[in-house]
Amino acid sequence: MNKLWKLVALALAVLMLSAPALSLAEDAAIIAHKADGIVIDGNLGDWNLDSPAVVDQPLQVIRDFDYWQGVEDLSAKFYLAWNEDNLYFAADVTEDTPLGAIEMLPIDGEDNLKLYISTNPESPADRTAYDTWDWLVYLIMDEPYWDTAIDRSMVEKDKALRFISMGMDGGESVLDGYECAVEMTTTGFTFECVIPWFNFSGENPNVKKCKIEKYVPKVGDVLKVDFAITDIDYPCPGTEYIPQMAWTGSPAISFSPAEWGTVTLAE
Ligand SMILES: [Ca+2]
Ligand SMILES: [Ca+2]
């Protein structure tokens, strides 16, 4: 190596050491359009696909990185749409072993989609702990069962307002009015679902004496949000390594909404 290259290498090393921790959350922002005639059939032709949350980079693998084989193994684009009554969620998933749930595994080890969402645009965007209106929704990708769960274990008891975790042992449907469908593609599948907003409130029929009011979304609201996807590639035995990817590429999304991205509700 000549002297110049040594200098360049040294400068690069210094730069890398002094760079702030890489955060994808700062740049992670999508738009959700008003749902216009979305039919839950697995075909995303009825969606505005202008603003995807793209998950396809090594930096976005948040678990068992050594077992992620690249974009054909697992990658996805996520979309949201909305109206006053419902949240719509779609995914275009590239996956070589799709819909691989195994009943005996904990739900975080099944093929799943995880939706992290706030239903309060007034919550401070930089909060480092979940508050009353922060939700982690598990959608198990297991045709035809489509189990759902809501994890509230990260919400402090006095903030949870009696809305606690449900469905976390699997085999349950905890979202009233939830409908979903998949369509297989040559490289994986497309998925879409509808989740009525009242599920994130005391109006969810599975909770009792909870005073969380139903969120009434409006154009211009900005909500914290994140997406994760879990891919079990290896049927038993050998299920101890199950890669997971997330939009903002940080395992800290499980306790800190500050690490999530945002969605802006638009027309
Ligand atoms: Ca459709
Ligand atoms: Ca795979």
Image: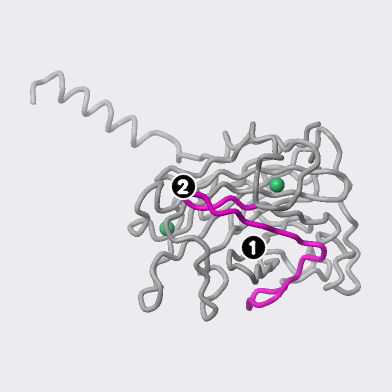
Q: Are marks 1 and 2 in contact (CB under 8 Å)?
A: no
Outermost residue, top side: 4
Relative side of 255 to 80, left or right? left
Q: Taking 31 as reference, is 209 above or below it? A: below
Provide residue 214's location: percent of width, then percent of height.
89, 55
Does the magenta portion include 214? no
Provide residue 26's location: percent of width, then percent of height.
58, 36
Disc 1/disc 2 C-alpha distance (Å): 20 Å
Q: Nearer the viewer, residue 209 or 66?
A: 66
Q: Nearer the N terminus, badge 1 or badge 2?
A: 2
Relative side of 154 to 242, left or right? right
**Which residue is labeled 2 in the image?**
60
Residue interval drawn in magenta: 166-191
The kind of secondary structure the magenta stretch mainly shows is loop
Ligand number 2: quarter of image:
bottom left
Q: Amino acid at mark 1?
A: Leu
Question: Which residue occupies 75% across, 70% down?
Answer: 174
Screen quadrant of the N terminus: top left
Q: Nearer the viewer, residue 60 or 4?
A: 60
- SS under mark 2: helix
Provide residue 156's location: percent of width, then percent of height.
72, 66
Is the residue marked 1 within 8 Å of ligand 1, measured from its CB? no
Q: Residues within 10 Å of mark 2 (few under 14, many from 20)?
A: many
**Which residue is labeled 1 in the image?**
139
Q: Marks 1 and 2: which is nearer the front?
A: 1
